[in-house]
């Protein structure tokens, strides 16, 4: 499972440079230790192309190894990016290296981190909402040009269904964040990605002048 991740303290801007995944210099492998959900999860059903699957949506926690001497461990919070790949909480994944991530969704992902990461760990519904917004950006290409076309309740690329107050709150919050992405243009320029056997770590880098 590919993931979106951030190792920054909650009070720090999501696009501040963090050394463990800073671009530039000689690439080296790192290890990610996964633990469990950030603050619980919301059960729902995702629909992406031919895929329909019951999932638990929410952020995860773990530890990131610097790979240096000494090997410094940093707390890390991350979310799923790729619905067709998986990982097992409680498992360590060695062999990560950082590199620049391209593709049309990068700018929208960066905007989402700028807008919503500070609130994404406030509650189980916000954590699930952040997850839904990530999947919507990844799979609903129509919103790349026009954020008004993002809607996690319907669409041709991705949508989610469910029931209960937590699902409704998460869906509504995700749509609110998605509708506000354009206010966060030109805040950062790049995303770094590391991979290990199909399980990827991605996080925002910056900041830069607009």
Image (cartoon, rainbow, N blue to C red):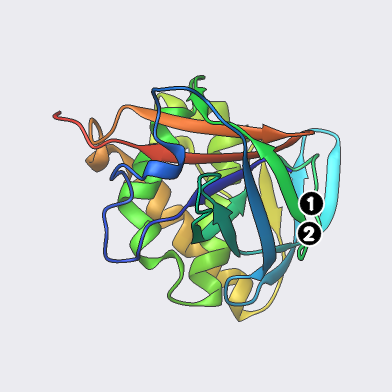
Say left or right for 49 vs 167: right
Give the quadrant of residue 44: bottom right
How far apart are labels 2 and 1 at the CA level?
8 Å
- Is residue 148 visible to us here? no
Q: Which residue is mark 2?
A: 91
- Point out residue 135 in the picture as x, y percentages from the top left corner: 61, 44
Residue 179 drawn above or below residue 98: below
- Point out residue 204 in the picture as x, y percentages from the top left corner: 40, 39
Residue under the image location 23 percent in, 30 percent down: 186
Cβ–Cβ under 8 Å for marks 2 and 1: yes
- Point out residue 52 in the picture as x, y percentages from the top left corner: 84, 47
Give the quadrant of residue 131: bottom right
- Point out residue 198 in the picture as x, y percentages from the top left corner: 77, 33
Label 2: few (<14), some (14–19) or many (≥20) C-alpha neighbours in 10 Å: few
Residue under the image location 47 percent in, 22 percent down: 26
112 vs 136, nearest the viewer: 112
Determine whether the residue tagged by mark 2 lies in a helix, strand or loop.
loop
Residue 120 drawn above or below residue 4: below
Choose mark 2 or mark 1, whichever is in front.
2
- Give me the disc on residue 87: 1
160 vs 87, nearest the viewer: 87
């Amino acid at each position: 499972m590919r993931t979106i991740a951030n190792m920054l303290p909650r009070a720090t801007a999501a696009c501040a440079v963090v050394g463990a995944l800073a671009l530039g210099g000689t690439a080296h492998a790192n290890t990610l230790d996964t633990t469990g959900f950030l603050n619980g999860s919301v059960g729902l059903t995702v629909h992406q192309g031919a895929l329909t699957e019951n999932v638990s949506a929410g952020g995860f926690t773990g530890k990131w190894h610097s790979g240096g001497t000494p090997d410094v461990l940093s707390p890390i919070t991350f979310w799923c990016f790729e619905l067709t790949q998986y990982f097992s909480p409680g498992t360590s994944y060695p062999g990560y290296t950082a590199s620049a991530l391209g593709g049309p969704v990068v700018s929208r992902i960066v905007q989402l981190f700028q807008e919503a990461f500070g609130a994404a760990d406030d509650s189980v519904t916000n954590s699930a909402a952040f997850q839904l917004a990530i999947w919507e950006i990844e799979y609903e290409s129509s919103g790349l040009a026009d954020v008004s076309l993002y809607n996690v309740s319907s669409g041709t690329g991705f949508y989610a269904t469910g029931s209960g107050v937590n699902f409704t709150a998460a869906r509504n919050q995700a749509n609110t964040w998605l509708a506000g992405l354009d206010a966060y243009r030109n805040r950062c320029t790049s995303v770094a990605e590391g991979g290990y056997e199909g399980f990827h770590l991605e996080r925002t880098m910056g900041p830069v002048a607009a």
